[in-house]
Image (tube, rainbow, N blue to C red):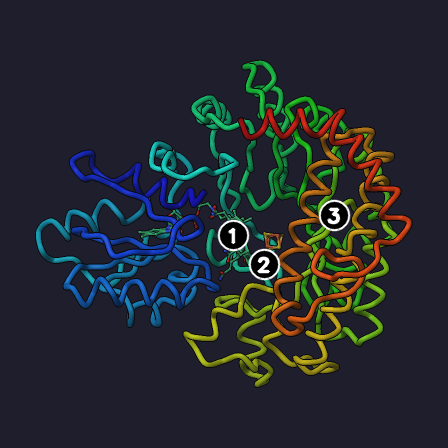
Amino acid sequence: MPIGLGIVAQITPPDWDVELIDESFEEFKFQDADLVGITAFTANAFRAYEIAAVYREKGIPTVMGGIHATMNTAEAMQHFDAVLTHDAEGAWPQLLKDFESGCMKRLYNGGYVKIEEISKVRRDIYNKYPYAYDLVQTSRGCPNGCEFCSVTHMCGQLYRERNIDDVLDELEETSRKLLFFVDDNLVNNKKGAAERAIRLFKGMVDRGIKKHWLSQVAVNFADNEEVLYWANKAGCKLVLMGIEAEKTAALKDLRKNLNLKRGADNYEWVFKRVHKHKIAILGTMIFGMESDSRDDLFARRDFILNSSIDCCQGTIITPLPGTVLFDKLMQNNSIVSNDYPRDWQHYHCMKAVINTPKLTNEDLESNMHDIWLSIYNKEAIRRKLFRTIWNTRSFESAYWSYSANFNYGRMALEEIIEKDPAGVNNNMEWKKRKRSLYLKVTDKILLLIYLFKWGRLTRKYYN
Ligand code: B12
Ligand code: SF4
């Protein structure tokens, strides 16, 4: 669910009727309104402009907010009547006042609001769609400024941490069994962060908030065993961990200082500690850094297959607007998909939009297709599944990591199928080829797991 819009709804005065329309569930159809607010990631920005055009043609005012509008304000202003950058809490009430008195400005900057001004989320607007997860944010901001990431610019350099009792109150208001803490780093590396995390997780247990959840973390998540202990007790099943690369040169390219400081040699220790507490690891891995040769891409693939990360988000490096990487590659003339705003559609990290010093965008993309086929094919993700069950001793965490691999695999395959509609190899579901013995045997094991463990779990999650 887009919680940014739940916040916009919450801070809208009650005399307004608010309706959410989410194109993930229904195709946009024109619907009359007094004012239309749209949020978009960069990959959806072009679509946002198309929708805004429909409203503007009918004389209905439009406002854009969110990540793309903040990172590319001048462009957004060409397509919308008004643009609100950064936090809605800092400017939306004023925008509405101006709108009501007929003098809405072109640009509002919400800035980085103080912790106590971060709004609650109005959740009834989500009732019309079958969202699987509730989303909750406990903090905003990150000082680390990794080269490829927009968060430091978007949310500020300070960790703005909400009061834990307020977060717990908010959690009590959520209704779904599944939860995603959308913090960029749920246990940051600031002094006192571990104690704060323990208070949150322990609070969930004490208040009987029974959720199964995932969040984003960094390698320091493993530092404090008490954090891991309470995270598990509070229902943590999977953490998305910023690994990005196993090679020092590639980490340096990304300015991923957190990982550089600890060293890639330390990764396995981190994975083991997290597994000990029955939590699976979704490793984010990036391909196509400045120093990456073809061999380096495949070495990263081998790391994914051989290390004990349970599932993987393997993406192509993408210069998102507002990042240091974007400015650098723009200056170098390395960006090949640069017919903006139309080309923003390709900025979802599964397309190569740049040439790197060692690879053309076409080489990078075709190598990635091979890599995706080897990390997400059915045999590979089943091998990972059995290893996760062994490492975490948890069928629940294994369910989460298997599903994540399965879903990322499908996303990757969509990219590949576009190029090769005849079908793909390696026992992917589209290929009509003989199933391997390994798949035939593990089909039966999976069926048993489903009958005895996962069937019950899915009913619990989705009923
Ligand atoms: C949660 C999350 C997701 C969720 C999205 C859930 C959802 N439905 O929103 C999932 C896991 C699906 C996801 C997927 C992806 N994500 Co993501 N994600 C995030 C994350 C961590 C938090 C976003 C969030 O919920 N924040 C909390 C809310 C409250 O903040 P907010 O949305 O910014 O809203 C505030 C303001 O912006 C404003 N606002 C927002 N919208 C509007 C609209 C109006 C009208 C107004 C007035 C104000 C306003 O008001 C809100 C309150 O202040 C951000 C990082 C970050 N910290 O922003 C990355 C981030 C948004 N993701 C990013 C990326 C790259 C992706 C993926 C492409 C990754 C991938 N390869 O799979 C995909 C793309 C999905 C897609 N459809 O295109 C990038 C986007 C950069 C960009 N320029 O687009 C970010 C910034 C991370 C990064 N490393 O840079 N993501
Ligand atoms: S990748 Fe993670 S650590 Fe780096 S700037 Fe982004 S949110 Fe911070």
Q: Single out the mark in the foreground, 3 or 1.
A: 3
Q: CA distance from mark 1 to mark 2?
A: 8 Å
Q: Is the distance from the Cβ of mark 3 to the nearest ligand 1 atom less than 8 Å? A: no
| Residue named by callout 1 | 157
Q: Nearer the viewer, residue 248 or 235?
A: 235
Q: Secondary structure at mark 2?
A: loop
x, y percentage for residue 6?
A: 36, 40
Mark on residue 311?
3
Q: Amino acid at mark 2?
A: Gly
Q: Is 437 situated left or right of 87 in this image?
A: right
At 48% from the left edge and 28% from the top edge, which residue is drawn?
167
Query: Alpha-carbon distance for marks 2 and 3?
Result: 25 Å
Q: Are marks 3 and 1 in contact (CB under 8 Å)?
A: no
- Going by the numbered disc 3, the residue's amino acid type is Cys
Q: Is mark 2 within 8 Å of ligand 2?
A: yes
Q: Position of residue 108 (x, y in %)?
A: 27, 57
- Going from N to C along the chain, the mark reached first, 3 or 1, is 1
Check the image and report above or below for 409 versus 276: below
- Tag shown at residue 145: 2
The front one of 174 and 103 is: 174
Question: For the residue carrying disc 3, how many other residues have a C-alpha within 10 Å: few (<14), some (14-19), or many (20+)?
Answer: many
Q: Give 119 or 353, whichever is nearer the viewer.
A: 353
Viewer-nearest of discs 2 and 3: 3
Q: Which mark is residue 291?
A: none
Residue type at mark 1: give it.
Answer: Gln
Determine whether, in the image, residue 27 is placed left or right of residue 428. left
Image point (59%, 75%), residue name: 353
Q: Position of residue 103 (x, y in %)?
A: 11, 58
The crowd level at tag 2 (other Cα within 10 Å; few <14, some 14-19, many 20+) is some
